[in-house]
Image (spheres, rainbow, N blue to C red):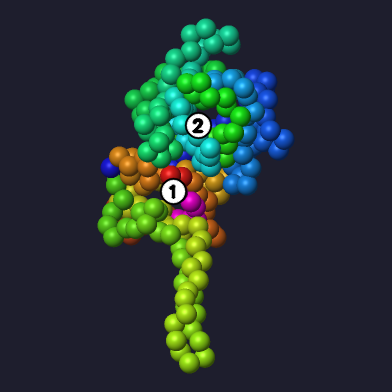
Amino acid sequence: MSALIVSNQITYDLVIDNTTVVHSGGELENCLDGNTYTSWQPNSGNSLINFTFDTTAMIVINEFALSGLENLPSDIVHINLWGSVSADFSDWIPLVGAYKPELDAGRRFYSEYDQQTPYRYYIVSIETETSALNKIKVGNILINGNSPIFPSGVSAPYTPPKLSAKTEILNNRTMGGNFVGRSVLSGQYDFIIKNKNITPEWIEENWLSLHKQISEKPFMYLWDDTRPQDAVFCWTKGDIPPPKYDNQCYFSFSIPCNGFIEND
């Protein structure tokens, strides 16, 4: 069991195919901006849509996550990420993604840690059996490679993000004290990313880049890589406390976060 944080390595200026027709306000760049209030809304009459991008260098990408995925057609086939070394995509091969059973089960995070082949060109594709792709919405696409994996599993006691719903309950009573109902105010998930028994070498190699990554943009957090259905799209809340020695040999850190689960 390992925890993982994934942010977006792809920006809109790397996209080389912007021919997909979209709804007004649903431009392609919206799914790469990290905002929770925008989305990419293809308006294609086809059953297959892709967009392509050029990373400008041969890099390894093996992590692919989605947030804000709505209106999946009932005959969805897959949402995949492909790689190619050629600009004409004549040799493209599937890297990571999910097919209908996984998507129907709410899986929003896909990863292949053993995929270490570098490519320069990449494609995100969405395909159905016959349905036109004119209603689907994709809030965010996160594409990255070799994000730092927390070297030790999350230690108990720990509340996974999926169980951290923040709810305020207001009971309503009459002047005489009789119960007449209640109001339930639900908010975003409120949780902590934490890890301990981290070696100084891991902190020195990863902490500053991780701090920069999560302080600038939202990200996908997976507390247990054997439970991809628990992936949460989140952002830091307040200051990010620095890591600290909690014994003579190891570091620990705790990062307060808000977010929302993708398969609810």
Of residue 145 and residue 243, the one placed in the foreground of this image is 145
Farthest bottom residue in view: 176
In-image side of 179 versus 13 (left or right): left
Which percent across, then down, holds residue 233? 49, 46
- Residue at 40% across / 29% down in the picture? 100
Instruction: Name the quadrant of the N terminus.
Output: top left
Residue 264, labelled with which disc? 1
Report whether residue 82 is seen: yes
Q: Is residue 100 above or below residue 243?
A: above
Which percent across, then down, holds residue 262? 46, 45
Which percent across, then down, holds residue 130? 51, 21
- Residue at 46% across / 31% down in the picture? 74
Of residue 91 and residue 202, the one placed in the foreground of this image is 91
* Residue 7 lies in the magenta-colored region: no
Q: Residues within 10 Å of mark 2 (few under 14, many from 20)?
A: some
Report whether residue 57 is seen: no
- Residue at 64% across / 20% down in the picture? 17
Which percent across, then down, holds residue 16? 65, 20
- Residue at 64% across / 42% down in the picture? 38
Q: Secondary structure at mark 2?
A: loop
CA distance separating discs 1 and 2: 17 Å
Q: Nearer the viewer, mark 1 or mark 2?
A: 2
Q: Which amino acid, mark 1?
A: Asp
Q: Secondary structure at mark 1?
A: loop
Q: Main secondary structure of the magenta part?
A: strand
Q: Which amino acid, mark 2?
A: Pro
Q: Residues within 10 Å of mark 1 (few under 14, many from 20)?
A: few
Question: Is label 1 in contact with label 2 (beta carbons under 8 Å)?
Answer: no
Q: Is residue 181 above or below residue 116?
A: below
In-image side of 48 versus 38 (left or right): left
Magenta residues span 254-261
Kindly identify which residue carries mark 2. 73
